[in-house]
Image: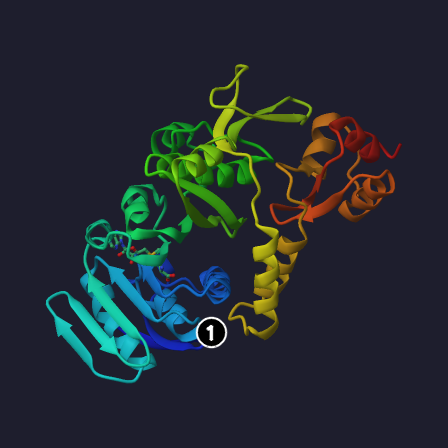
Amino acid sequence: MELIEVSEGSARFLVPKAERIYDAPVFYNPVMALNRDISVLVARALEPKRVLDALSATGIRGIRYALESPAEEVWLNDISDEAYSLMKQNVALNFEGELYEEGDRSYLWGEKLIVINKGDANRLMAENFRYFDLVDLDPFGSPMEFLDTALRSVKRRGVLAVTATDTGVLCGAYARACVKNYLARPIRGELCHEAGLRILIGTVVRYSAKYDLGVEVLLAYYRDHYFRAFLRFKSGAKKAEKSLAQLGYLWQDEDGRFTYEKAFLPEKPKAFGPMWLGPLKDSEFMERLSKELETFKPAHKKTRSFVELLAGELDVPFHYDTHALARRNGLEVRKVSEVIERLEKLGYRASRTHFSPTAVKTDAPFEVVLDVLRGD
Ligand code: SAM
């Protein structure tokens, strides 16, 4: 494989030369630098000691955790031979010290311990029971096949960072696959991204409950056709039950009006879910993240503004897309900034949302939002 050297954050590393990213023998997507930036920021804010990058490819994510966060022990893993060989080269490029190899595993003891493993992520996680403070799952498509072992491998007060790139499934283009993989019914239309993210979290909550683990959402978002959630666990049956109580269902009418209800079973037909209806961020954690951002040099030019957008977003379930509402109700489109200003003047809370540049999050009732769109 022909390699070229690139850099991202504090790391310089080799990636395969390829016309298109999915043709490369080892995967590297520079657009995901924003995902990795936010992950590093999270690790800086939380200071986990042991971190697992379970699906590493080039190793860039784990290498950045080791270089840019206080983590003391970072494990990189991939099932592919080519990825393993590249991870070793990339670790050697970024850290001083000798690589010591034993079977399918290499170690580098320097200022930090870096472990590079070749193997199935499920096997590695199963073998390392309650070992990691932070487990990062960044798969092709759905993370579900790795979820159970990740929940066993993470410490009981640890954190799971999880990506899902199967947006077609979670957003309802392949509804049967969503039922099969996430045990939930997805919605199509303007709420699909937020509902997809909430289905992903809801499924993690349901899987976690049987281990007596409750889930706290530190931060979750949708961007560039992927979902990402940082979830902190809390140990205990009561904690698990409390998290389950945040699950429920969503309904939407033809005119765009939505309703949702926290319940174990849907009380009306045509429900979407089950899905997480709790917060998508923790305000105290967001303050720490924003503080970290002050001294952080992001690799992606949009990271800073995106984190600021997330921090400023009103954290209420679902949103109104001004374009979709206008189309559904035969109204003219209005500027989002105008809609927010009008709603605030009427005494409601309102903000932009990262889910769509044309949408608002607000605690105003549907009729009020429609009146504002009508210009009343
Ligand atoms: N985390 C990487 C990054 O930030 O650049 C990208 C990871 S890539 C999307 C997914 C990787 O998972 C691939 O390199 C693939 O070889 C690896 N993979 C797939 N199935 C696996 C398994 N069962 N165990 C370990 N690695 C696996």
Residue 76, by quadrant, is bottom left
Quadrant for the C terminus in the image:
top right
- Nearest the eye: 248 or 104: 248
Is residue 119 shown above or below 347? below
Is residue 310 shown above or below 291? above
Q: Residue furthest left?
A: 103
Residue 142, given in percent of the width and then of the height, sits at 36, 43
Residue 173, given in percent of the width and then of the height, sits at 46, 33
Q: Is mark 1 within 8 Å of ligand 1?
A: no
* Mark 1: secondary structure: loop
Q: In this view of the protein, can residue 361 be seen by the observer? A: yes
Q: Residue at x 84, y 39 (%)?
A: 347
Is residue 4 shown above or below 150? below
Q: Residue at x 69, y 24 (%)?
A: 255
- Nearest the eye: 133 or 120: 133
Q: Amino acid at mark 1?
A: Gly
Q: Which residue is mark 1?
A: 9
Left or right relative to 366: residue 182: left
Left or right relative to 231: residue 355: right
Q: Residue at x 32, y 58 (%)?
A: 132
Q: Residue furthest right?
A: 376
Mark 1 burial class by Cα count in 10 Å: few <14, some 14-19, many 20+: some
Q: Residue at x 63, y 62 (%)?
A: 305
Quadrant for the N terminus in the image:
bottom left
Give the image quadrant in which the ligand numbered 1 is located. Answer: bottom left
Q: How many marks?
A: 1
Residue 203, given in percent of the width and then of the height, sits at 41, 36
Q: In this view of the protein, can residue 1 be seen by the observer? A: no
Residue 232, given in percent of the width and then of the height, sits at 45, 50
